[in-house]
Amino acid sequence: MKKLFLILLLALAAIMPMQAQIIDPVKWTFAIEDLNENEFDLVATATIDPEYHIYSTTMPDLGPLPTVFDIKTSEFFEAVGEARDLTDVPMFYDDIFEVEYKQFSGTASYAQTFRKLKEGSFPVTGEISYQACKDGQCVSLTEDVDLTYGVIEAVEPEATAGAKSNIWAMILEAILWGFAALLTPCVFPMVPMTVSFFMHGEGESKAQGRFKAFMYFVFIVLLYTLPIAIIIMATWLLGGNSVTADIFNWLATHWLPNIIFFLVFMIFAASFFGAFEITLGSNMVNKSDSKQSTKNLGGIFFMALTLVLVSFACTGPIVGTVLIKSTSGEFWAPIVTMFAFAVAFALPFALFAFFPNLLQRLPKSGGWLTSVKVVLGFIEVALGFKFLSVADQTYHWHLLDREVYLGIWIVCFALLGLYLMGRIRFKGEKEVKELGVFRLVLIIIDLVFVVYMIPGMWGAPLKALSGYLPPKQTLDFDLNRIIEENSEKVIDYVDAKFANMAVAPQGEAQVVATFDEEVKYADLFHLPHNLKGYFDYDQALACAKAENKPIFIDFTGHGCVNCREMEANVWSDPRVKDMLRNDFVICALYVDDKTDLPKEEWYTSTYDGKEKKTIGRKYADFQISKFGTNAQPYYCLMDHNGNLLMKPRAYDLDKDAFVNFLKDGIKNFQEGTFYQHVVD
């Protein structure tokens, strides 16, 4: 009985580690939501384990894998457009790939719209492929979709913690812009007019005066907030959340609005530089101004309207910036951020209306306002090119690659520094004979910023500006990349020279590998550091037999951040590179590649019973079937009969440990010692 118990205990111990290796950190729920009589959404909601995150449906070419909908359409329905994110989070900057993308933690919702071709009930089946990552490992997974169209369930996407933090960041930025707007040359002169309007309240009590001041504040806020709220409400009532999201997505990414915004910013910048004055029609302003004569609520409303209209020449671009930064498809985000801007903008006027004597403490308008106007002009030019850059990247025009964009910013802010120093003057400005402390501080900040940007022309990451700059891969001359490539060539050249100079023992010729079969998939995949290897397991196995070498299997992926970290920080070690180059046959297996296999290579997995039709599916199935894990990176040392030489190794940046891993693998290969790896 004791022996039986011991056997069961050992069996359980062998099984449990294997079960722990199967990683499935995301739980999915699916529902169908009718949009109208002819269209419906398939909504997928992911609940993600705390340590993991998954990715957006739209990702850059370099970086982690996107979440992809692969739904089998039929005679009953067809897809409309691409799958989209319903959850919104701030953009994440990836230091490894040097690109921006969105990643989701906690929960994430996605949707794909379909158009019905026939009435009746029908199956909606397929799968969603995605990548889940945490520190140390990434997992490429799929989830089956199996629903029946007929019973409609409304799905309300859950807001993530990232979305909440994003909205608060936008609110804070909107508040700062609102306060900054007070200093613009169109707005600041309105302060005395406001005070004079509220000082002539003869016969009124303080309570009445404060009530009118409060209503003045309310009207300013409403005049800024209500128009955008009405537009959003109208689109939502006509087409629901998806239409509102589509409109904002169109505003944020389509070339037409971005070109319009760019031109608007350039026109306002020219106005701030003194080329011409931008004013609203005099009839509009005069009519609203004529209504101010009465001190009832109507007069207060038209006083607020006059302020909004007159100040629009300066606040228009600011309002546009606030709105565009919040147009992520969230129903409330643009309304809330516009409300925050309006409150901050209106608050100083309300305070001056409450306490008119505060006016005496303000600096008088004059030359300093002209300087503010010019400074705003330079900032308008810089920010305006961001809109043109969005259109350029979206449509691949290649007009504003990274170095061109940076060149514009460097010149723009260098000219701003010269202006602040008094070296540049605009029409009607007085000569700057001496620098005040505040102006000197601004000059230092501006020139430090210019110096910071200059190395970006040759490949410096400029992480502080990652949200504004085009991606680094658009850089034509990347000094870091050139140095790395040429250093590898020099190292390889020197290695080759030393290899040719080496004399074999007893005068024998050196044995050189003779397995020179054409490398399969060499047009698709490449190894780092100029290493040579294979991308097909069977071919690598044949090479290992021919050369009598162990195999180094690298389960990797295009979007595996940790794989790139290992390659950059561990594989780059000269000891590691030397052993990989000379002592192993390298076999890199991409588990996330979407390239179709030839039809004769399709097969049905014995693990999950699904047909494997792509390179990635084939080797993902191979990894989980043979080694019981689906995480990357995952390194296996094997002999040419498929026996493991060492316990497989995952993400770990310890270079010495990796060197020992390779050395022990070589030793075990020579001695014929194997590692017993149990897979349930």
Image (cartoon, grey):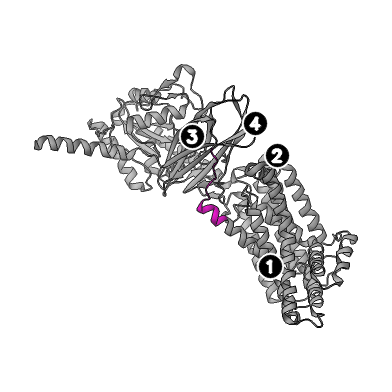
* Disc with the residue nearer the chain's start (3 vs 4): 4
Q: Residue at x 68, y 62 (%)?
A: 341
Q: Please, what is the three-letter code of the amino acid marked with disc 2?
A: Trp
Q: Is residue 470 above or below residue 505?
A: below
Please tell me whether mark 2 or mark 3 is closer to you in this view.
Answer: 3
* Mark carried by residue 397: 2
Q: Nearer the viewer, residue 172 or 401?
A: 172
Q: Is residue 161 magenta?
A: yes
- Residue 602: give x, y in percent of width and height: 45, 20
Q: Is residue 35 above or below residue 342?
A: above
Q: Earlier in the sequence, mark 4 or mark 1?
A: 4
Q: Horizontal placement of 405 versus 267: left or right?
A: left
Structural crowding at the residue carrying mark 1, measured as other residues with C-alpha within 10 Å and reported as few (<14), some (14–19) or many (≥20): some
Query: Of the residues tagged 3 and 4, which is closer to the observer?
Result: 4
Label 3–label 1 contact, CB within 8 A:
no
Q: Secondary structure at mark 4?
A: loop
Residue at mark 1: 179
Q: In the rendered structure, which segment of residues is drawn in magenta? A: 153-166
Q: Residue at x 59, y 46 (%)?
A: 472
Alpha carbon distance from label 4 to label 2: 36 Å
The residue under label 4 is 38
The residue that disc 3 covers is 129
In the displayed orientation, state which residue is furthest to the top. Answer: 600
Contact between marks 3 and 4 (CB within 8 A): the answer is no
> Disc 2 versus disc 1: distance between alpha carbons?
37 Å
Residue 288 in the figure: left or right of residue 45? right
Gap in angstroms between the C-alphas marked 3 and 4: 27 Å
Tell me the amino acid under the disc marked 3.
Ser
Three-letter code, disc 1: Phe
Describe the element under mark 3 as helix, strand or loop.
strand
